[in-house]
Image (cartoon, rainbow, N blue to C red):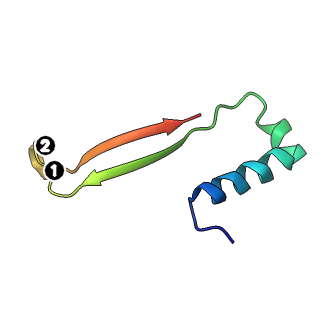
Amino acid sequence: MPRYLSDQWIEALDEAARAHRGLAEATESVAFVIEQVVEQPGGQGQSGGQGQSRRAGHR
């Protein structure tokens, strides 16, 4: 089994999703975005001590 969120895991997820007819029909007009959020502890430069976030989305 591929390591969680590795390139191989993403490829296996993509293959499984593409092969599932019901999923393809149900999501035909849906845009699906996977997003990773990385927060920096301490939130330098942020008021209130909140962590800083960087977001990257893929379609």
Residue 6 x %, y %: 57, 59
Disc 2 element: loop
Q: Is residue 2 above or below residue 28?
A: below
User: Which residue is depicted at the point 21% across and 51% down?
Assistant: 51
Which residue in the protein does label 2 denote? Answer: 46
Q: Type of residue at label 2?
A: Gln
Q: Type of residue at label 1?
A: Gly
Residue 15 x %, y %: 78, 50
Please name whichever residue, 42 or 47, is drawn nearer the observer in this view of the structure: 42
Q: Quadrant of residue 29?
A: top right
Q: Is residue 16 above or below residue 2?
A: above
Q: Is residue 19 left or right of residue 59?
A: right
- Quadrant in the picture for the C terminus: top right
Q: Circles 2 and 1: CB distance less than 8 Å?
A: yes
How busy is the neighbourhood of tag 1: few (under 14 within 10 Å), some, or many (20 plus)? some
Q: Is residue 46 above or below residue 4?
A: above
Which residue in the protein does label 1 denote? Answer: 43
- Quadrant in the picture for the N terminus: bottom right
Number of numbered callouts drawn: 2
User: Which residue is depicted at the point 76% across and 36% down?
Assistant: 27
Q: Is residue 45 left or right of residue 58?
A: left
Disc 1 element: loop
User: Which residue is depicted at the point 89% across and 44% down?
Assistant: 21
Q: Quadrant of residue 13?
A: bottom right
Which label is found at residue 7? none
Tell which residue pokes out farthest to the bottom in this image.
1
How busy is the neighbourhood of tag 2: few (under 14 within 10 Å), some, or many (20 plus)? few
Residue 32 x %, y %: 63, 37
Residue 33 x %, y %: 57, 38
State the separation of the CA atoms marked 2 and 1: 5 Å
